[in-house]
Image (cartoon, rainbow, N blue to C red):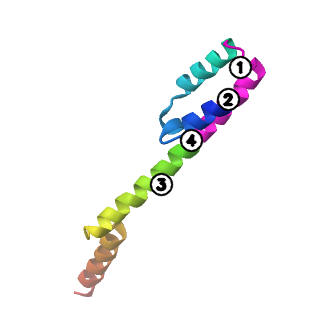
Amino acid sequence: MKDLIKRGLSLGLGLAVVSKEQIEKLVDELVKKGEVSTAESKDLINELLEKGEAEQKQMNARIHEQLEKVLRDLNVPSKADFERLEKRIQELENKQ
């Protein structure tokens, strides 16, 4: 049953959007049903939380990559582009 829950929560956004309280509640239900021991419950909670954090980081990285791609496609200047232009303007002003 634990494996089924781990696989089910790991699908899609699964663990990335499940709160600590929801995970604890789910694991508590498993303990009440006798499918997980009390000793195992803490390890299971920690494991699910770690997986959730990892999924959240992966999701954030994918969103960041997609956003950068859209900005490049739209030819929106980057922060580095602005900084380079500001430096160039400053250099030109200092020459005068």
Q: Is residue 34 above or below residue 12?
A: above
- Mark sitting earlier along the chain (3/1): 1
Q: In the image, what residue type sits under mark 3? A: Ala
Q: Which residue is mark 4?
A: 53
Circles 3 and 1, Cβ within 8 Å, touching? The answer is: no
**Which of the numbered marks, if any, corresponds to residue 61?**
3
Q: Secondary structure at mark 2?
A: helix
Q: Nearer the viewer, mark 2 or mark 4?
A: 2
In three-dimensional space, the C-alpha distance between marks 1 and 4, rounded to whole angstroms, equals 25 Å
Q: Which residue is mark 2?
A: 2
Magenta stretch containing residue 48, yes or no? yes
Residue 88 x %, y %: 30, 80
Residue 76 x %, y %: 26, 67
Q: Nearer the viewer, mark 1 or mark 4?
A: 1
Q: Main secondary structure of the magenta part?
A: helix
Q: Nearer the viewer, mark 3 or mark 1?
A: 1
Q: Nearer the viewer, mark 2 or mark 3?
A: 2
Q: Quadrant of the C terminus?
A: bottom left
Q: Which residue is mark 1?
A: 35
Q: Residue at x 37, y 70 (%)?
A: 80
Q: In the image, what residue type sits under mark 2? A: Lys
Quarter where residue 36 is shown: top right
Q: Residue at x 65, y 28 (%)?
A: 45
Quarter where residue 54 is shown: top right
- Mark sitting earlier along the chain (2/3): 2
In three-dimensional space, the C-alpha distance between marks 2 and 4, rounded to whole angstroms, equals 19 Å
Q: Secondary structure at mark 1?
A: loop
In three-dimensional space, the C-alpha distance between marks 3 and 4, rounded to whole angstroms, equals 12 Å
Q: Is residue 14 above or below residue 78?
A: above
Circles 1 and 2, Cβ within 8 Å, touching? The answer is: yes
